[in-house]
Amino acid sequence: MSIEVNVYKAEEEIESLLTSNPRAVKAFDKAIRKLLQRTARDVRKANAAVIGNDPRKTARAVKTAVYKRILGGAVSILDKKRASGTRARLVRARKLDSNPHQRGGNRMQRSQRTEGLETYFGSDRAFVLRFLNSGADRTNAGAMRSRSGSHLKAPANRGIIAARNFFDAATIRAMEANMAQFEEDFRNELKDILE
């Protein structure tokens, strides 16, 4: 999921300046970088509003990129290949812990994999943000070994995660809201070059 901006709609003088003057290109890149940073900040806020209760900061999993070959950039959901070394454990109080003699309650021990996933924090939870945005046809709890270890139980179907499609709309709104500031930043950068 990625929203791109290609702000190459300048007047002829600016276009020729950008193609002939490396300092003008640097000024443009600097203004684009500021635009993308402001946009990403606004998108993170919009993500947090859609997600709601977000103690593990999933809404932070947004990245920006300024292009080198063309004038422009992109704001997108992070696509990390592996988690960072930083982990955070969120301890939630359960009724069962305070009153072990109560009837009912989930007494299943969590698997090591579940415990590991529970420690992902911030940008490492980009996969959750993608699921919330794009949805999932079917999620399951995976195959589980019985207590005796002799046979496998079938995966437990956990249903469908409906796509919310909030990321694109939030990014476009944020980009449009910050465009006037981008133009002002770029003009100021150009003034420094032309003076």
Image (cartoon, rainbow, N blue to C red):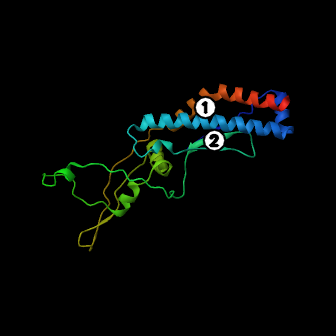
Extreme-bottom residue of the structure? 150
Give the residue displayed 71% in from the left and 26% down from the top.
Answer: 184
Residue 5 appears in the rendering:
no
- Residue 187 drawn at (x, y percent): 75, 27
Q: Quadrant of residue 22?
A: top right
Q: Amino acid at mark 2?
A: Ala
Give the spatial CA distance, label 1 vs label 2.
10 Å
Give the residue displayed 57% in from the left and 31% down from the top.
Answer: 174
Q: Categorize mark 1 by other alpha carbons within 10 Å: few (<14), some (14-19), many (20+).
A: many
Position of residue 19 in the picture relative to residue 149 (left or right): right
- Secondary structure of the residue carrying tag 1 is helix
Give the residue displayed 20% in from the left and 48% down from the top.
Answer: 95
Position of residue 194 in the picture relative to residue 96 (left or right): right
Position of residue 124 in the picture relative to residue 161 (left or right): right
Foreground residue, 179 or 145? Answer: 179
- Residue 17 drawn at (x, y percent): 85, 33
Tell me the tag on residue 85: none
Q: Quadrant of the C terminus?
A: top right
- Secondary structure of the residue carrying tag 2 is strand
Residue under label 2 = 74
Residue 154 appears in the rendering:
yes
- Residue 27 drawn at (x, y percent): 76, 36
Question: How many labels were placed on the picture?
Answer: 2
Residue under label 1 = 175
- Residue 101 drawn at (x, y percent): 12, 54
Q: Are marks 1 and 2 in contact (CB under 8 Å)?
A: no
Q: Amino acid at mark 1?
A: Met
